[in-house]
Amino acid sequence: MEAVVTNFGMQAAAAEIFLLSAICVILLVDVFLNDQQRWITYALSLLTLAGTAFVTVQFAVDGRVAAFEGMFIADPMGDVLKLFSYGTVAVSLLYSREYLQRHGLFRGEYFVLALVALLGVMVMTSAGNLLTVYLGVELLSLSLYALVAFDRDSGIAAESAMKYFVLGAIASGTLLYGFSILYGVTGTLQLDELAIAVREVGPGNLGLIFGLVFVIVGIAFKFGAVPFHMWVPDVYHGAPTPVTLFIGAAPKIASFVLAIRVLAEGLDAMVASWQGMLIALSVLSMIIGNVVAIAQTNLKRMLAYSTISHVGFILLGILAGTNDGYRASMFYTLTYVIMSVGSFGMILLLSREGFEGDQLEDFKGLHRKSPWFAAVMMMLMFSTAGVPPFVGFWAKIAVLGAVIDVGLVWLAAVAVLLSVVAAFYYLRIIKLMYFDEPADEIGIQAGGTIRAVLSANGVAVLALGIFPSLLLDLCARVLP
Amino acid sequence: MQSTITWPILSVLIWLPIAGGVAMLLLGDKGISLGRWLALITTAVTFGISTLLWTHFDTTTAQMQFVEERNWIPLFNSYYALGVDGIAMPLVVLTTFITPLVVIAGWTVIEKRPAQYYAAFLILEGLMVGVFASLDALLFYVLWEAMLIPMFIIIGIWGGPRRVYATIKFFLYTFLGSVFMLVSLVYMYLQTCDAGQCSYAIADFQRLPLGLNEQLFIFVAFLAAFAVKVPMWPVHTWLPDAHVEAPTGGSVILAAIMLKMGGYGFLRFSLPITPDASDTLDWLVISLSLIAVVYIGFVALVQQDMKKLIAYSSIAHMGFVTLGSFLTFELLSVNGDTRGAAMGIDGAMVQMVSHGLISGAMFFCVGVLYDRVHSREISSYGGVVNTMPIFAAFMVLFAMANSGLPATSGFVGEFLVIIASFRADFWYAFLAGMTLILGAAYTLWLVKRVVFGPVANHHVAELQDVNGRELLVLGVLAIAVLALGLWPAPLLDVMRPTVENLVQQITVSKL
């Protein structure tokens, strides 16, 4: 790809700069607020997201622009992914407010950490250099560890944060080790130079492959692909639900972009090597994720395993190693994020004082209590299962097309077979909501914001399912 | 008559019921007395509009008619393309004909969440019409799968005691069958891209040159989808469960229309897209069909549950549909018998329409009894004729039709298929002909045990004969069954050019 290199790249990084400044302001303002005025921090955070979006749109680029000596890249794909990330962070804040207030977690640090995590996602999205990639990864990961442990009185949250931190640190180390080997062989950390250097050294070089293995392990860990998935169920289960919702959204976009920047842009010549590794990761993720999800009784854990299986699908698109595949994978990631945010939002909707709403049993007879939200959950579940006319189906068909196109028909057959297994546990939720009688008569107590956002979320899943072109064309435009 | 309809009639047939269904959902159970009429009017108007399809249908051409086309997903070059030919049109009309009857049949019977009950059926109707009318494979697939959702809900909410097991089995079975079809559709789409023009149009798939191995894989994938839907032995086991547990309306729609989609799929996809693979593997389908006719016939004989018996009888009768469709290849390869081949497909089509009417009617009959006694066991009944003479007359008529009595629609389809199988091989005809004995045996024995004899118990003694609403449903179906049996020519005329074209298409090898 031909890159226009500008040395003075403030414009390319305008959104990041704006966000970082705003974070500093929020951090300062929050110090002077008491608990009754905490809503100001909340409002400022939402305003910041809107402002960042505005800046991103203002400085949107048509082609690929490299800044800061190529350390930083602005391109249309990055812009779209960033805008989506703002959206998911905003939605997750809207979903979370009531829960946080109820649990005494409605504190300024929460919003700051969420915004710093978002900054990490943005840095990863725009990374043009392996060090920038690593910077973004750490910025995101460290914020997430802290967020998971945010409810400091909860033993299970502390445990899962510990687990997340230790395993995450190992993964970051692995990633960094892989980068250092790549640097040792090629002598560059710059992604575009790396792509050229790999061709000169020859993609079959043993040192490169050795480094690649470590890089893949790091990426697989951040994605939560089997066999590097052990943290996912524990963290999803242990973290406060708003944090789980957060982890399921923007960081997934970040993992996708990590794979694209490093594998598809930096190491594209080694596709033959990483394709095989990703096939193994993908098939294992789909099998373990879907089969183990059946055995879960906690919805957060079930969705964690379901996430693992969806990661398998996202990897399908990437491993195709074609532009069609990357586009399909991007579409899948965005679609998945929309559905995942909605599903966790549903748990937040049900939760109330002294009631988490995260057991499968809690959904019993929801239909009687609230026909509309039962319908929303039904749409989300059918969509996640990949049943038309919901948007999840289009994500599935897009990645299937990508792998069939490169001659991996057997892989497509395995994928669809496992999606039938997956259908079972999504159907079980619908069964609980519609075919069973409610265990109690306590209705939904959530406020107006969460109801409105969740309704919009459900409608989006159906509308994008009937008119998939709205999102598909966007992905096609930025990844031609 | 020339097609003179300029407005998008097929879109109306799809979206009008869906809009009605959404309106029902918004109206809710509180406004149900209004809602019932809304449902009835919507379905009746839909049927009324669909009769225009019949009257304006051009019976001289095999071309798609009433075609609509709109760009839907430019990236996949997929179109919202609708149209019907002689195979699809009768099935669309069958769908719109049966649905109002289902609405009437549930009028006072459904007390639990009635608004959603009607909404589910209305939405289902729109989706089913769409399946028959799609010219784009992607659109077809979306509707084909989407259809499972309302049916899943219908069985799961309004079904019998084992409804959860039955409905999840139904969903997973059909889903499993369909996903492989999805893979093969995507595969063919990519083949069209290689050929220069990406397309999901079914017509383009039919023209697509494919090697024998590719065809075999695609054929098997299609077989998985359609065989489950028809259903063919040995993937039929979801059907008895689903039928037994479903509410009457659900059973009627399942038997009358959803099963037909399997048969339709064979005619629309398998035969023209993979003619050589169909030719190679026709022995498989023919054997499975004959097993269905004979073995399932025996299975039906021993059932204790009325709905189960009719479900098994459906499987046996649908065996004729697959037999008639695939006999074609035997006939063509043996002596190039195109007339016999056309007769086989004609027979399959007539059998589909006729079975839609008869099995629907049989399930309505069981529903009438069930609403009064709340038992589906044959042993709970006996001597119903003494207390319900009018009902008994209808039940005997439909039973006769089910066993293929001449002058009923059941005769025409089976007769055509048996004649066609005679042209192919005596033993096919012999085994297919067994149905005349078996079908008569299990149906008439059912009637004997339920309708005739002395009054069995006080439940039967207290039975009230059919009310006006039930009489309307059964009467309309009886007229249809007799009309099609006595004078099938209009149906055959509508189909003729399309069937001849189809036979023409499959005689040309793609290799």
Image: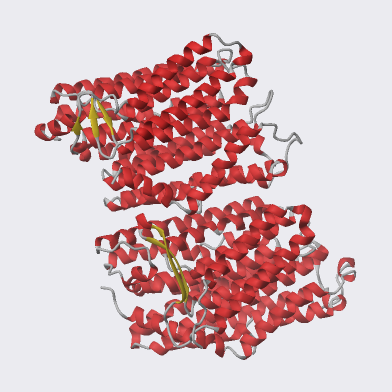
- Picture coordinates of residue A197, whole percent (x, y): 13, 31
B74 relative position to B3: left or right: left
- How does the figure colour the protein chain or chains? secondary structure
Can the viewer see residue B438 in this picture? yes
- Picture coordinates of residue A258, whole percent (x, y): 32, 31
Q: Residue at x 70, y 32 (%)?
A: A445
Q: Residue at x 72, y 64 (%)?
A: B38
Q: Is residue B125 above or below residue A256?
A: below
Residue A10 or residue B228, whichever sits in front: A10
Residue A226 or residue B93, whichever sits in front: B93
B467 relative position to A298: left or right: right
Q: What quarter of the picture does the N terminus of chain A occupy? A: top left
Q: Which of the 4 image quarters holds residue B280?
A: bottom left
Q: Is residue A361 above or below residue B467?
A: above
Can the viewer see residue A164 in this picture? no
A240 relative position to B73: left or right: right
Q: Residue at x 72, y 82 (%)?
A: B397
Q: Is residue B431 above or below residue A76?
A: below
- Picture coordinates of residue B482, whole percent (x, y): 67, 86
